[in-house]
Image: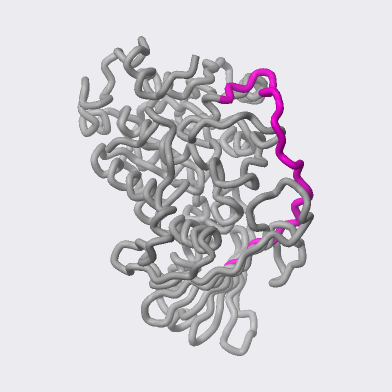
Amino acid sequence: MKQSRRSFLKTSALGAAGLAIGGRGMSSKSYANIIGSNDRINVAIIGMGRRLEAFVTPVSKKENNARLTYLCDVMEERRVKGAERFSKVLDYTPKLENDVRRIHDAKDVDVLIHATPDHWHAPGACYAVQAGKHVYVEKPCSHNPREGELLIEIQKKHNKVIQVGNQYRSSKKTIEIINEIHNGIIGETYESICFYTASRGEVPVAKLAPVPKGLDWDLFQGPAPRQEYMHDTWDYNWHWYGWAFGTAESGNNMIHRFDLARWAMQLDFPERIDAVASKNHFIDDGWTVYDTMSTTIRFPNNKVIKGDCKSRNGYKTYGANNGVVVFGSKGSVFLSGTGYKLYDREGKLIKEDDSNVDLVDLHFNNFLDTIRGKAKVTSPIDEAEKSTLLCHLSNIAYRTGRNFDINTNNGQALDNEALKLWSREYEPGWEIKV
């Protein structure tokens, strides 16, 4: 029987355990101070898909003093495979769960890692923070602009650490070169080009099909309005089938590039978005969103971020699969992966560093250190959401077929059609409540 989040919380035995939900039990601010600098942190991972491997090392490293208490996924097969993977690095067995709401209420969880589809990111993070947990949420941190606003409000209200998976923010080499940009090494910055190139293939045309064995389709949808199951749309392909679950390639991959550019140029909210996007490859397949997008995002003082996103054309326009080129009055910087190349105004290479490091390890360590009071989170929700907003604005421009101006004080669209897509419809009982 389908059960809303609200009714679940009322009836769950764990929900009556006395944690700070809806103002009951220990206050969120008191709970935030429990974890000391050397205390063990209990971790739950939500989502056993493609991102699972990235968290195996940081969660299992003894020096991080973290204990994996839960593995959660709506697909039984993935829960089992996740447990098998961690059995190779842990000398104990975490509990397996398909329903994240039980983990929100669990006493033996301090931290949730949300590696779910996009439509779960903000609601899941908000529910967890309201239940007294710290959250590491994968990019994009929201499915739409309003969810980003709610995330910021709820984080401030409950005083929990939220780390967003913009892991380049924890790269020592990236921090080094961006600090140099801020100190004027390429003069006054005026433009960045952000690019992502991939050669994704055809996807099936969606059609009604039985729910795969072991998949809890109701919980997969969670906050999204209910729909019948369609063949091969749940396993990663949800990115390309409409807007119920995904945010297209902008939210999937351009987010990293936009974040680097905005960070390097020290920009806040833009003043205008212009986007041209379309589906240009495998015209008759099941892909229903754009696979090619060009954006021009204008900021005050004649600053510009341009986006070049090609999901299914692998031509390397800029000599790499992805990256950011930051232009300044005295030179430029090419950022790709964890490395960079610094050029003078004439195009001569001055300095480069192409070293490779495990960014998720660094990013997760920073998250734990922040919880323990030893560091400051490198990708806080208020900063991350400004970058995520650039993805949402690009998508809204595509979906409405309109370019529009933006309020530079808060990032809100100055266009009535755009504002109609500022939020989304929720399954009754799954709304985000502040």
Q: Quadrant of residue 85?
A: top right
As drawn, which residue projects farthest toward the bottom?
346
Viewer-proximal residue, 271 or 207?
Answer: 207
Q: Is residue 340 above or below residue 241?
A: below
Instruction: In the rendered view, tell whether residue 342 sits above or below residue 413.
Output: below
Quadrant location of the C terminus? top left
Extreme residue toward the top, this view: 13
Q: Is residue 288 left or right of residue 418?
A: right
Q: Nearer the viewer, residue 58 or 17?
A: 17
| Res. 353 in view | no
Span highlighted in magenta in the image: 194-217
- The location of residue 134, given as percent across then percent down, is 37, 35
Residue 180 is situated, as x and y percent measured from the top left of the image, at 45, 72
Q: Does 87 lie within the magenta span?
A: no
Q: Determine the residue positioned at 61% across, 89% down.
A: 346
* Secondary structure mostly taken by the magenta-highlighted segment of the chain: loop
